[in-house]
Amino acid sequence: MKVLLASLFALFLTACGSGKKPDEQAFLNSLDSAKSGPTIDEEVINSILQQIPSPLEISVLLKESGTKYSPNILNSPDNLPKYNSNYKKALNLGVYGTDLGYTNIYEQNQDGIKYLESIKSLADGLNIGQFFDIETIGKLAANSKNLDSLLLITTQNFNSINHYLQTQSRANLSVLLLIGGWVEAMQITCQVSAKDPKNKELQEKIGEQKIILEQIVLLLGFYKEDANMASLLKDMEELKGAFDAIIITYTYRESTMEVVEGVAIIKDNSTTTINITEKDIENIKSLTNSIRNKIIS
Amino acid sequence: MKKIFSITLLMIIIGAGTTKLAGQCNPDNFANACIPKLSSGFNFLKSYKVDGEGGSKEKVEYSYVFTKGTQYMINLCATGTATDGIIVTLFDSSRNKVASSKINGQFISAIAYPCNATGIYYIQYTFDGSAGKCGGSALGFKR
């Protein structure tokens, strides 16, 4: 009877345990430069992280505005062997994530599969490969009719990775992933804008990144004890300096609403105007290119 | 007698645990259920958990940078009636109210917001006569 009770009690304790899988433990043990976390409230970091918009929004804008697909402006998936440290792996996981989104939006599935392979390899290297369902994504990518599902599952996978990193108190890798993705989206936008210098919408899109860059600088400031993060922060502060000349004017006017077929449709009467010059664009383009080259080299 | 007592004690311990689990909010399920309910043409961006922790939290808040020229949709999912008294309200970075899913006393399960001003927005969930104070939400976008 005692033995039975002891066994049941042990089983009960196990069931109530941490539930950590072996690969989760491997992940926790594997981090190198990411060992020292910040001494700040991680809730603050996570709340800033979730604000950063998806790079997919930029890719959709480019396609909708009639811009042609340009694979040469992306980071080649063949650069994968260059990324050996966790710092570089996390940054370039973000870069390739943006590139994958871009190829998906343009329905360039063959290119997309190459990015998927590099993404899977980087994610495995960071012990977060279990969140990337490459088999399902590969099947979806084989048919252009699956675009919606493909976009959905890739977004969900990246969200899961970010969520996991944050819950494991490793938000520093999540920060790098998001920064890599943002820099690549900036690079794509600047390169397309350079080819289409009269496109005001693209110029505004570049200008409004000022708001996001301010959040990125804030995030990196939490990790300046780390040499790699400090160096990246310095680069981002320089880029922020180029954005300082851009003036964003916000005017609030109360919105109106109506219900159509069960959905509340908002009419936004507020506006933002973005004052950005060709010189600003040139400075931002040059600095973005320099930062991006450091990331992908 | 000892045997009966031990088994009864064990059953009580396991039973207590199970009861607690059954009463817990599982917002992940609601958030995931909300994703396919985004209207056609919207690309999924984020899912949000709305857990009022049995009434101890009056609001749950997230933030996101919305950009001019993009249309966003935020929907709500909960147990029972469409939104179970959960309201989503959108505020701009200066905390001006931009949109709400409660219009003229009616609880709406989705809002579509064609953004005209880029900036940080706060997506706030509150509970108005909500029984479960538990739900989920999804954010999508289209150009």
Image (cartoon, coloured by chain):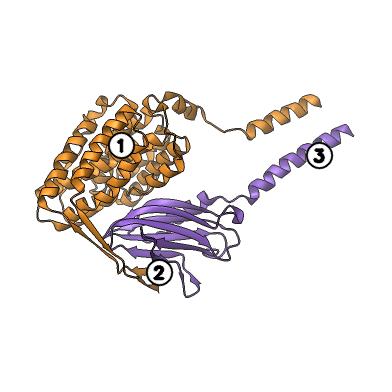
For chain A, the rendered hue is orange
The residue sitting at 40% across, 62% down in the picture is B90
Q: Quadrant of the C terminus of chain A?
A: top left
Name the element at disc 2: strand
**Host chain of mark 3:** B
* Residue B24 appears in the figure: yes
- Residue A225 percent coordinates (x, y): 35, 29
**Host chain of mark 2:** A
* Residue A110 appears in the figure: no
Which mark is first along the chain, 1 or 2?
1
**Residue A116's disc number:** 1
Task: Tell me the quarter of the picture where residue B70 sits.
Answer: bottom left
- Residue marked by disc 3: B8
Task: Tell me the quarter of the picture where residue B12 sits.
Answer: top right
For chain B, the rendered hue is purple
**Residue A264's disc number:** 2
- Residue A101 percent coordinates (x, y): 28, 45
Q: Answer yes or no: do the residues labelled 3 and 2 have beta carbons within 8 Å? A: no
The residue sitting at 32% across, 25% down in the picture is A85
- The disc labelled 2 sits on which kind of residue? Ala
Name the element at disc 3: helix
Q: Answer yes or no: do the residues labelled 2 and 1 have beta carbons within 8 Å? A: no
Q: Could you say which is closer to the camera, residue B66 or residue A224?
A: A224
Disc 2 from disc 1: Cα separation: 38 Å
Q: Residues within 10 Å of mark 3 (few under 14, many from 20)?
A: few
- The disc labelled 1 sits on which kind of residue? Leu
Disc 3 from disc 1: Cα separation: 54 Å
